[in-house]
């Protein structure tokens, strides 16, 4: 019988690439994201490859919607083997430019979204005595990133969530893995939030990132997807994907220098330091 994976943020970017990799690996797919048309379009493509696909429109910030997602997945498939927490949002700007709503968007999506799925699915994994939880964090969950404070805070929280869960759940047959990519050329610019000192600063921040993303060496969603499937197969608890290794390593060896370089790179028109 095929194994079953639930993937959040599965309609685009890293989530969709991950769904494709799992489909090729013979998994049934339960796919979640908000935009129904995009989710259904992804599901139609993946139905050509995966044994079974179910698309369940879900906003992972909403605990009730996530409970419905998990309950439906369990009732349709009987047993769930893997959860990939991936739905996330990018938010950039000087720390004093964010509204509290911006902070909530970052933390509610990138952290609470992951807590909601884990809270709803954990009793099922514990009753089976098996299961794998993959949390897609970021190099920004290992290395502090100036001008990405709400994002980096949410991702450091995901790192703590992952590592403490792994410590507690590994004797109970459950593997919890953190995935740490660097910048990936996905579809995240469509929903990314940019703030700044003024309108010019906001535009400059967006342009700066668009320029970096246009460099051919920037890694692709499938680089992360491959790492996720491999982590699940080999019960890995942490994968630092590709070039993220250099960021994490530099931060260990030369943290002050790295922070200075990042401040210079990302400050744009912020003159306050
Ligand atoms: N791209 C990068 O450079 C990068 C680097 C490191 C880590 N990451 C992490 O990788 C993960 C995926 O990022 P990505 O770059 O692939 O993003 P993406 O291309 O923007 O795709 C995001 C996916 O998540 C869904 N989503 C967003 N908010 C959601 C919500 N509240 N509820 C349910 N689904 C939601 C989106 O669909 P809907 O909008 O229709 O819901 C979409 O399917 C994120 O956790 C991100 O932080 C990305």
Image (cartoon, rainbow, N blue to C red):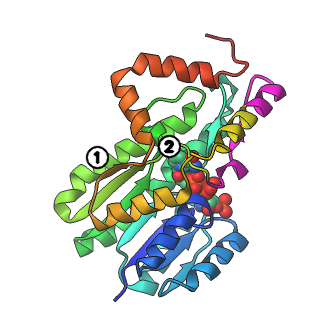
Farthest residue toward the right?
199
Q: Is residue 147 above or below residue 91?
A: above
For marks 2 and 1, the one nearer the N-term is: 1
Instruction: Tell me how far mark 2 sits from mark 1, CA to CA.
Output: 23 Å
Q: Write down which quadrant ligand 1 falls in.
A: bottom right
Secondary structure found at label 2: loop
| Labelled pair 2, 1 in contact (Cβ < 8 Å) | no
Which of pointers 2 and 1 indicates the residue nearer the eye? 2
Magenta stretch: residue 12 in it? no
Residue appearing at x 43%, y 33% in the figure: 247
Mark seen at residue 182: 2
80 left or right, relative to 16: left
Please provide percent x and percent y for residue 54.
54, 81
Note whether residue 8 is visible: no
Looking at the image, which is closer to me, 98 or 21? 21
Q: Judge whether residue 194 is colored magenta.
A: yes
Position of 165 with respect to 104 (left or right) is left
Residue 223 in picture, x, y percent from top left: 48, 57
The verdict on label 2 being within 8 Å of ligand 1 is yes
């Amino acid at each position: 019988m095929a194994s079953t994976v639930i993937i959040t943020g599965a309609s685009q970017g890293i989530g969709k690439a991950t769904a494709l990799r799992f489909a090729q690996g013979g998994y049934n797919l339960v796919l979640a994201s908000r935009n129904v048309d995009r989710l259904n379009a992804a599901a139609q493509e993946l139905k050509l490859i995966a044994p079974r696909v179910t698309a369940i429109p879900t906003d992972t910030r909403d605990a009730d919607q996530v409970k419905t997602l998990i309950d439906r997945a369990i009732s349709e498939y009987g047993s769930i083997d893997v959860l990939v927490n991936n739905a996330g949002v990018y938010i950039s700007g000087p720390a004093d430019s964010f509204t509290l709503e911006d902070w909530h968007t970052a933390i509610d999506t990138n952290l609470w979204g992951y807590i909601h799925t884990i809270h709803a699915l954990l009793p099922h994994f514990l009753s089976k005595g098996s299961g794998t939880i993959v949390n897609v964090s970021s190099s920004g969950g290992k290395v502090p990133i100036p001008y990405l404070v709400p994002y980096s805070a949410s991702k450091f929280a995901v790192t703590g969530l992952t590592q403490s869960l792994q410590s507690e759940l590994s004797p109970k047959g459950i593997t919890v893995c953190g995935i740490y990519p660097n910048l990936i050329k996905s579809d995240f610019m469509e929903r990314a939030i940019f703030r700044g000192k003024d309108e010019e600063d906001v535009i400059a921040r967006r342009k700066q990132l668009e320029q970096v993303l246009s460099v051919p060496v920037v890694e692709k969603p499938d680089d992360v997807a491959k790492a996720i499937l491999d982590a699940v197969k080999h019960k890995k608890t942490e994968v630092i994907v590709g070039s993220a290794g250099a960021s994490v390593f530099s931060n260990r060896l030369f943290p002050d220098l790295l922070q200075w370089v990042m401040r210079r790179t990302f400050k744009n028109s912020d003159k306050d330091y």
